[in-house]
């Protein structure tokens, strides 16, 4: 163990010592300065992730999923980006109040990220073994030899066949699925408390997608990490997520345990997303698509941002912003973990 690790052990309480949520994003607002004015990418996002829990964040492209993740990770483009409001509480500490030096210590070690495109995240001129080993050399002070052994061990863990023989290969010598496994290995290397996977399987073939997603879910359970799984594809999260937050125009519009969301969506946007999933039993039929496009973020519609596209919109939807309202059962009892930002959530959940 290096000196750095010993210092960490004294200064930082382990996840076990802390009994609040692992991560709590509170009222986060992020905007980007553009020629057309402020693009309001994130407009009051709240979510929590516990240790060992998987939160899927879902929404069409441009809904603010990645920007929220970049704010948590501390890699937001600033400028043009600006966090105008909010808190990001990680193990009881507001990350937004830390110095860049302190945040750097958390990045990779406590919170790690997996991106969609492994090829652009990995260095093309360095072997994967070198890049994996670097995690252990730099952060844990291991020798070259020990770091290489660790790299092979990690490649084994993510089920790369013949890891020892392939440790000196370069990124382009691996298939897309294998490269994504290497990204997962890099993210897991320092056993972080939280992993943010931003569209980790979007660039892969459908069959490979499922394998990589299963692997990620398996390792997440084994390591008892919190996982934020960002995707625009409702089809890939059903088996791996505990709960889902649906985002639209920088807001969470519905929140629910995963099975409740599939069974009884309480927001017309979620309903639209569910209806757009291709189903085997409806082969040949034309696929439903939500009409229109997400709004320009410099000119978000007044009232409910979804109103121009919503088949259920009424007058009130064009004037009043619907708050994220707890969803209750017919007898009035609150349904645990459920909320919807629709004026007509009752009609939606029942219809
Ligand atoms: N670096 C940037 N510069 C300017 N605007 C940005 C930048 N990154 C994101 N945005 C704005 O934030 C919006 C939301 O982006 P993002 O969070 O990446 O969406 P997604 O839900 O697809 O991950 C984008 O549509 C864009 O308007
Ligand atoms: S508030 Fe109105 S416009 Fe928005 S989702 Fe509900 S019904 Fe549709
Ligand atoms: Mg994104």
Image (spheres, helix red, strand yellow):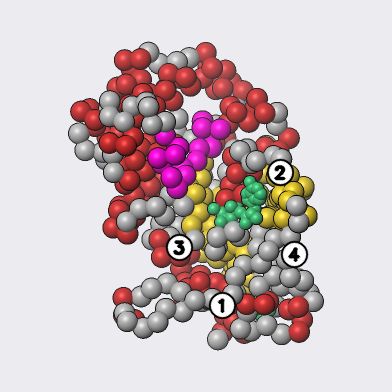
Establish whether ligand 1 lies closer than 8 Å to the Cβ of label 2.
yes
Q: Is residue 207 magenta?
A: no
| Any part of residue 86 in sight | no
| Any part of residue 97 in sight | yes
In the image, 174 versus 104, the foreground residue is 174
Residue picked out by circle 1: 291
Image point 48% across, 57% down: which residue?
231
- What residue span does the magenta drawing correspond to? 107-122
Mark-to-mark CA distance, 3 and 4: 26 Å
Q: Which label's residue is closer to the chain start, 1 or 4? A: 1
Residue 268, x across and y down, in percent: 59, 77
Residue picked out by circle 4: 299
Q: Quadrant of residue 234?
A: bottom left
Mark-to-mark CA distance, 3 and 2: 28 Å
Residue picked out by circle 3: 233
Image point 35% across, 53% down: which residue?
204
Residue 267, x across and y down, in percent: 60, 74
Q: Which label's residue is closer to the chain start, 3 or 2? A: 2
Q: Residues within 10 Å of mark 4 (few under 14, many from 20)?
A: few
Q: Which label's residue is closer to the chain start, 1 or 2? A: 2
Q: Quadrant of ligand 2?
A: bottom right
Mark-to-mark CA distance, 1 and 2: 31 Å
Image point 55% across, 72% down: which residue?
270
Residue 215, x across and y down, in percent: 33, 47
Mark-to-mark CA distance, 1 and 4: 19 Å
Q: Secondary structure at mark 1?
A: loop
Q: Which label's residue is closer to the chain start, 3 or 4? A: 3
Q: Are marks 3 and 4 in contact (CB under 8 Å)?
A: no
Nearer the camera: disc 3 or disc 4: 4
Q: Which mark is residue 80?
A: 2
Nearer the camera: disc 3 or disc 1: 1
Image point 52% across, 13% down: which residue?
3
């Amino acid at each position: 163990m290096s000196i750095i690790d010993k210092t960490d052990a004294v200064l930082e309480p382990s996840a076990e010592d802390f009994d609040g949520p692992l991560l709590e994003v509170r009222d986060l607002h992020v905007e980007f300065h553009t020629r057309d004015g402020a693009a309001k990418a994130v407009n009051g996002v709240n979510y929590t992730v516990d240790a060992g829990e998987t939160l899927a964040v879902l929404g069409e492209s441009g809904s603010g999923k990645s920007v929220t993740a970049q704010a948590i990770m501390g890699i937001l483009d600033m400028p043009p980006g600006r966090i105008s409001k909010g808190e990001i509480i990680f193990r009881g500490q507001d990350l937004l109040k830390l110095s860049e030096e302190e945040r750097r210590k958390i990045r990779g070690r406590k919170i790690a990220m997996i991106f969609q495109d492994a090829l652009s995240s990995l260095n093309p001129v360095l072997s994967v073994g070198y890049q994996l080993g670097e995690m252990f050399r730099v952060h844990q002070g291991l020798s070259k030899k020990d770091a290489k052994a660790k790299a092979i061990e990690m490649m084994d863990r993510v089920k790369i066949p013949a890891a020892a023989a392939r440790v000196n290969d370069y990124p382009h010598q691996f298939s897309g699925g294998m490269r994504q496994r290497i990204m997962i290995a890099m993210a897991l290397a320092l056993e972080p408390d939280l992993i943010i996977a931003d569209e980790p399987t979007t660039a892969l073939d459908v069959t490979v997608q499922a394998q990589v997603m299963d692997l990620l879910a398996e390792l997440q359970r084994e390591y008892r990490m919190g996982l934020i799984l960002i995707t625009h594809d409702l089809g890939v999260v059903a088996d791996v997520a505990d709960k889902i937050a649906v985002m639209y125009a920088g807001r969470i519009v519905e929140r629910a345990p995963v099975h409740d969301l599939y069974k009884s969506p309480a927001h017309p946007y979620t309903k639209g997303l569910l209806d757009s999933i291709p189903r085997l039993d409806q082969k040949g039929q034309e696929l439903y698509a939500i009409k229109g496009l997400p709004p320009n973020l410099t000119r978000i519609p007044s009232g409910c941002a979804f109103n121009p596209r919503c088949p259920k919109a009424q007058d009130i939807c064009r004037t009043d912003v619907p708050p994220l309202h707890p969803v209750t059962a017919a007898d009035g009892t609150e349904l645990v973990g459920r909320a919807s930002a629709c004026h007509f959530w009752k009609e939606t959940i029942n219809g």
